[in-house]
Image (cartoon, coloured by chain):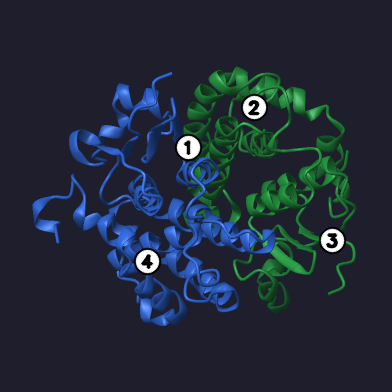
Chain colours: A blue, B green
Amino acid sequence: MQAGKPILYSYFRSSCSWRVRIALALKGIDYETVPINLIKDGGQQFSKDFQALNPMKQVPALKIDGITIHQSLAIIEYLEETRPTPRLLPQDPKKRASVRMISDLIAGGIQPLQNLSVLKQVGEEFQLTWAQNAIISGFNALEQILQSTAGTYCVGDEVTMADLCLVPQVANAERFKVDCTLYPTISSINKRLLVLEAFQVTHPCRQPDTPTELRA
Amino acid sequence: MQAGKPILYSYFRSSCSWRVRIALALKGIDYETVPINLIKDGGQQFSKDFQALNPMKQVPALKIDGITIHQSLAIIEYLEETRPTPRLLPQDPKKRASVRMISDLIAGGIQPLQNLSVLKQVGEEFQLTWAQNAIISGFNALEQILQSTAGTYCVGDEVTMADLCLVPQVANAERFKVDCTLYPTISSINKRLLVLEAFQVTHPCRQPDTPTELRA
């Protein structure tokens, strides 16, 4: 099977796509981006071609090594197992558990409740409050957890998968006008991560599909 | 640190708790159950004691090896890394990616949208339709994915973490009156899994906290 350059199906603003972009950047994996606009044409994720690629009709999806993987954490774990350097999971199983716990809390406990398709179902009138509630309830827990796991970053002093989940989620929180100053641990880790190159080049404001007015 | 017998904080009907109970059973890990009733007393997960244990106020949580882990998939991955036999993730990284993709689809893409706390927010009138929509949309995708990954079980012929997610989610689907005959692959895998001892002894109808009228 011809592997070729990995292809990332991504949307500039999708927090789940951003997680994977950071992993690819940190691991120095060269890839092509195929933008899937979640809003244009009623949502390009609903096209027949994309559904064949990811029946969940969600980004990201990564074509790599002859397979297509969706679900951002499954993609990151695959990259970690096949391209282990630099590591995104610590060596110690207990620390790995902390990383996965924080990642799952964000990827399973916050983001799914405030993503585009759910907010559509909630109805325009209630969207902001609904999204804020999901994020606030998750961040209340996360702030407490980080107080016992964090060093420079979410778990200790190395960048891990948990950090790849944190930064895009904080960006969503800001978009939904959540007051992040209430979460000093989350905010200070986020600030330390945002200056790193892998987080900068993958930022939603610097993607091939970022609209001109949102570029920075 | 004295490790002692692991303690699982669990609710008989929680699908996420059930996932972990199956992992513990398959791996032959002896443990104590502390039932956390998600309904009684306004929800025992909101007690101060339990919040100190899991700030997300959710079950399951597992006390093991001197640490407390929450988030069911993080718990299962920890058990896999520290008690590798029998394995719940295949050896081949591509198959591992399939297992994690299916697990994340259920644990991040379906269950969070139909759990108790979200349904409370939706309001009684819309709960059933909301839960059904979440499950149907996830099962439509899952049925298609399983057609290319499944053997006897979700991924090939060995029981994996994906199966630990599937069976409890099908039970939820049935509770919410989703017509599972529309999903022949999901249904037949579920049937083959339900006869296995580890799935039987951990079934919600056979837990220490199962109410008498629901016992079987």
Label 2: state its secondary structure: loop
Q: Are marks 3 and 1 on the same chain?
A: yes
Q: Are marks 4 and 2 on the same chain?
A: no
Q: Nearer the viewer, mark 1 or mark 4?
A: 4
Q: Quadrant of the C terminus of chain B?
A: top right
In front here: A80 or A52? A80
Query: Compared to B214, does A167 lie above or below?
Result: below
Give the crowd class for mark 1: few <14, some 14-19, many >=20 residues within 10 Å.
some
Mark 2 vs mark 3: which is more N-terminal? 3
Q: Is residue B101 left or right of residue A188?
A: right
Residue highlighted by disc 4: A170
**Residue under mark 3: which chain is it in?**
B
Give the crowd class for mark 3: few <14, some 14-19, many >=20 residues within 10 Å.
some
The answer to whether residue A213 of the structure is visible from this angle is: yes
Mark 3 vs mark 1: which is more N-terminal? 3
Residue highlighted by disc 1: B133
Q: Amino acid at mark 2?
A: Cys
> Where does the image place residue A210, in percent across and percent down from the top left?
17, 50
Mark 2 vs mark 1: which is more N-terminal? 1
Q: Nearer the viewer, mark 3 or mark 1?
A: 3
> Where does the image place residue B12, in percent across and percent down from the top left?
78, 51
In front here: B70 or A19? A19
Residue highlighted by disc 3: B6
